[in-house]
Image (cartoon, rainbow, N blue to C red):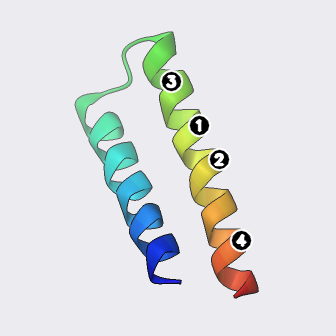
Amino acid sequence: CEALKAALSEKDAHLALLELSGIKNAVQADQAQRLREDKERLLERLKQE
């Protein structure tokens, strides 16, 4: 459970950094989308525990 929370926090921080610096190209947009999807999966796993 703690590992999931840590991973979620890391994804959140990375996503915030990307959004703060501005998503300027397709690669960054893809990264942001992947982070959002990963975050959703982690949240679902946390809810199941």
Snapshot quadrant of residue 41: bottom right
Residue named by callout 2: 37
Q: Distance between the residues labelled 4 and 2?
A: 11 Å
Q: Which amino acid does label 1 sit on?
A: Arg
> Which element carries disc 3, helix, strand or loop?
helix
User: Is 45 located above or below residue 1 in the figure?
Assistant: above
> Which element carries disc 1, helix, strand or loop?
helix
Check residue 44 in the rendering and tell me which mark sits there, or answer none. Answer: 4
* N-term-proximal mark, 3 vs 4: 3
Q: Which of 18 and 1 is in front in this view?
A: 1
- 28 relative position to 1: left or right: left
Q: Which amino acid does label 4 sit on?
A: Glu
Residue at point 63%, 70% (across, down)? 43
Q: Nearer the viewer, mark 1 or mark 3?
A: 1
Residue named by callout 1: 34
Q: Which of marks 2 and 3 is in front?
A: 2
Residue named by callout 3: 29
Extreme-top residue of the structure:
25
* N-term-proximal mark, 1 vs 3: 3
> Which element carries disc 2, helix, strand or loop?
helix
* N-term-proximal mark, 1 vs 4: 1
Q: Distance between the residues labelled 1 and 4?
A: 15 Å
Q: Do the residues labelled 2 and 1 touch (CB within 8 Å)?
A: yes
* N-term-proximal mark, 2 vs 3: 3
* N-term-proximal mark, 4 vs 2: 2
Q: How far apart are marks 1 and 3 (CA)?
A: 9 Å
Q: How far apart are marks 2 and 3 (CA)?
A: 12 Å
Graded by Cα atoms within 10 Å as few (under 14), some (14 to 19) or many (20 or more), the crowding at tag 3 reads: some
Residue 20, image x and y in percent? 26, 39
Residue 23, image x and y in percent? 38, 24
Extreme-right residue of the structure:
48
